[in-house]
């Protein structure tokens, strides 16, 4: 009986040791994953900051601003035609050109 108990105890010890080794390895892997996640967060933030400083980002913002403005002007013209037929949409274009020229002239160094 003691031989069987000794064998069971030996198997239990081996299993416990193997389990602790695996737990230790899992804990180490979790630690590495956490470190990599932190690096990735920093890298993401740095990459975003670098992109925001780039010419590509600024030009894409200008493109979206210009596209948005075109849509607003188109909708405004449609509204003028539909709801205010007494106003000529072409006059709106002339007004915008005049306003743009005035703004550009004001921005020029004197």
Image (cartoon, rainbow, N blue to C red):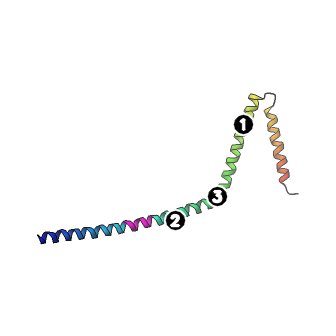
| Magenta stretch bounds | 26-33
Tell me if residue 72 comes above or below residue 107 in the rendering: above
- Real-space CA distance between mark 1 and mark 2, rounded to the nearest whole angstrom: 46 Å
User: Label 1 belongs to which residue?
Assistant: 74
- Asked if residue 65 lies in the magenta stretch, the reply is no
The secondary element bearing badge 1 is classed as helix
Question: Residue reaching furthest left?
Answer: 1
How packed is label 2: few (under 14 Cα within 10 Å), some, or many (20 or more)? Answer: few
The secondary element bearing badge 3 is classed as helix
Corner quadrant of residue 58 = bottom right
Relative side of 77 to 43, left or right: right
Query: Residue 52 bears which disc, if any?
Result: 3
The residue located at (12%, 72%) in the rendering is 3
The residue located at (36%, 68%) in the rendering is 25
- Real-space CA distance between mark 3 and mark 2, rounded to the nearest whole angstrom: 20 Å
User: Label 2 belongs to which residue?
Assistant: 39
- Asked if residue 32 lies in the magenta stretch, the reply is yes
Tell me if residue 47 comes above or below residue 88 in the rendering: below
Relative side of 76 to 37, left or right: right
Mark with earlier residue (3, 1): 3
């Amino acid at each position: 009986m003691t031989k069987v108990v000794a064998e069971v105890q030996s198997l239990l010890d081996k299993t416990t040791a193997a389990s602790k080794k695996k737990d230790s390895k899992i804990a180490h892997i979790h630690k590495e994953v956490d470190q990599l996640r932190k690096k990735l967060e920093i890298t993401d933030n740095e990459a975003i900051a670098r992109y925001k400083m780039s010419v590509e980002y600024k030009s894409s913002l200008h493109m979206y601003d210009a596209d948005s403005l075109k849509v607003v002007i188109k909708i405004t013209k449609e509204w003028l035609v539909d709801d205010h037929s007494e106003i000529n949409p072409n006059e709106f274009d002339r007004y915008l050109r005049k306003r743009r020229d005035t703004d550009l002239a004001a921005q020029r160094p004197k």
